[in-house]
């Protein structure tokens, strides 16, 4: 099979890139060893985080560092056995998380984040699923005055610097918005601008169906077989034979560095693992919007399958066996917060968030490898940023004027 361009990886980032390239009259083959939106794109909290301009920094506070190191906080779980391999990435992540680094990341992320809902809306309209958008925002919950006041102070500063919108919420107002929360809380922050969906995997699959409807092809194949042929074209081995293209885009999330290393291109890509579980709700209990338990680092979201509990970050070997300790730790707190009943899934779901040290994605050409492009490393915002990243990538590939300066996302910034 021969095509103009192949996109390696059929998650939210890959399928979005394929659609935007297709719109620009490129023939596109989407290649994945599994199905569309089966990995991290399926298992997230379902929020399109238009407020997510400010990154998730690595802590610099000595007390918090110690708590992370000894797994004293449920929001993080460290595997000491993974440290030898992860240490170089963690060190760069730590260095990029100082005040100046956070400001650089926020300024770099802002053009992508602010356009994220608009780009999703466009694809949803075309896919006929715009009704899946829930325009309710989400709540960040606080149990103490100290934590609440600190959050208000931080968000006030972020609003001044980056335009992030928020609204402080009293306990009475929390009960109005979410009457089935069963725990007394000191306060909350309503983040009114983000939207959410009840099934992020279904959104990705709908985008995949749109791609097929418009003449695209989806093939099973192994991205690690990617080679550049003597004629300059790119080739991977598919289930039905070689797939050949003039250009190729790496959208493999946490596995992207496996392919780049083949071509002697080193990239400091790490991963933060995370888990989710679905629960039935007791009686007629409902959640009207996602809620973030800031003390315990998990999110509850009403999904098609039930109430989804999504955990914080696990620092572990990317492909190591599941160790859902965080889920076991936070489930009692979640049951105290909301009337969860039975687990719905037979086992916890495990996903991997691809993270570069500065918490910005890599979007653009890979230096020294003509026709090879990067679109990966979206950390916690892959579902959010997939469509807008696909647009920027497609504009660069086809020689259009990019809607924003792509310099902050160039992959060679780590060389």
Image (cartoon, helix red, strand yellow):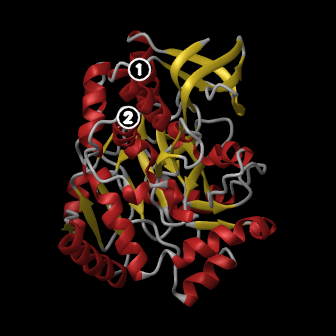
Horizontal arrangement in the rendering, residue 345 relative to residue 112 (left or right): right
Above or below for 214 versus 273: above
Above or below for 398 versus 221: below
Residues at discs 1 and 2 in contact (Cβ within 8 Å): yes
Q: How crowded is mark 2: few (under 14 residues within 10 Å), some or many (20 or more)?
A: many
Q: Residue at x 49, y 66 (%)?
A: 358
Q: Can residue 373 be seen in this view?
A: yes
Above or below for 118 versus 411: above
* Position of the N terminus by quadrant: top right
* Position of the C terminus by quadrant: bottom right
In the picture as drawn, the residue positioned furthest to the bottom comes out as 62
Q: Which residue is drawn at 69% across and 27% down?
A: 229
Horizontal arrangement in the rendering, residue 57 relative to residue 407 (left or right): right
Residue 333 drawn at (x, y percent):
52, 62
Q: What element carries label 2?
A: helix
- As drawn, the label of residue 394 is 2
Q: What element carries label 1?
A: loop
Q: Is residue 350 visible?
A: no
Residue 124 drawn at (x, y percent):
30, 27
Residue 185 drawn at (x, y percent):
34, 70
Q: How far apart are marks 1 and 2 (CA)?
A: 10 Å
- Residue position marked by numbered label 1 in the rendering: 26
Q: Residues within 10 Å of mark 1 (few under 14, many from 20)?
A: some
Q: Which of 226 and 60 is in front in this view?
A: 226
Q: Residue at x 24, y 78 (%)?
A: 157
Residue 225 drawn at (x, y percent):
74, 31
């Amino acid at each position: 099979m021969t095509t103009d361009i192949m996109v390696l990886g059929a998650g939210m980032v890959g399928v979005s890139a394929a659609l935007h390239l297709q719109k620009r009259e490129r023939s596109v083959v989407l290649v994945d060893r599994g199905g569309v939106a089966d990995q991290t794109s399926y298992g997230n909290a379902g929020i399109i985080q238009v407020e997510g301009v400010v990154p998730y920094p690595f802590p610099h506070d000595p007390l918090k560092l110690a708590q992370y190191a000894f797994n004293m906080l449920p929001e993080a779980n460290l595997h000491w056995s993974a440290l030898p391999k992860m240490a170089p990435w963690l060190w760069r992540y730590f260095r990029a998380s100082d005040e100046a680094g956070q400001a650089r990341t926020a300024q770099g992320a802002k053009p992508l984040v602010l356009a994220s809902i608009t780009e999703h809306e466009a694809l949803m309209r075309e896919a006929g699923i715009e009704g899946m958008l829930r325009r309710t925002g989400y709540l960040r919950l606080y149990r103490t005055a100290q934590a609440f006041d600190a959050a208000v102070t931080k968000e006030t500063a972020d609003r001044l610097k980056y335009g992030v919108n928020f609204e402080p919420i009293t306990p009475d107002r929390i009960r109005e918005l979410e009457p089935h929360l069963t725990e007394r809380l000191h306060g909350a922050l309503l983040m009114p601008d983000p939207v959410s969906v009840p099934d992020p995997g279904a959104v990705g699959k709908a985008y995949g169906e749109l791609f097929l409807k418009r003449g695209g092809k989806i093939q099973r194949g192994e991205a690690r077989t990617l080679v550049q042929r003597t004629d300059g074209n790119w080739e991977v081995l598919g289930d039905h034979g070689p797939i050949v293209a003039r250009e190729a885009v790496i959208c493999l999330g946490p596995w992207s560095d496996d392919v780049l290393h083949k071509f002697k291109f080193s990239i400091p890509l790490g991963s933060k693992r995370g888990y989710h579980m679905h629960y039935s709700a007791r009686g007629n209990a409902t959640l009207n919007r996602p809620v973030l338990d800031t003390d315990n680092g998990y999110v509850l979201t009403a999904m098609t399958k039930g109430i989804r509990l999504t955990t914080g970050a696990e620092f572990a070997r990317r492909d190591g066996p599941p160790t859902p300790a965080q889920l076991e730790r936070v489930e009692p707190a979640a049951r105290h917060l909301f009337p969860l009943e039975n687990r719905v899934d037979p086992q916890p779901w495990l996903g991997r968030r691809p993270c570069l040290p500065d918490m910005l994605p890599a979007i653009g050409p890979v230096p020294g490898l003509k026709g090879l492009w990067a679109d990966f490393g979206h950390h916690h915002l892959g579902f959010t940023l997939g469509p807008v990243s696909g647009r920027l990538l497609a504009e660069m590939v086809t020689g259009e004027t990019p809607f924003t300066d792509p310099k902050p996302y160039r992959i060679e910034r780590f060389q």
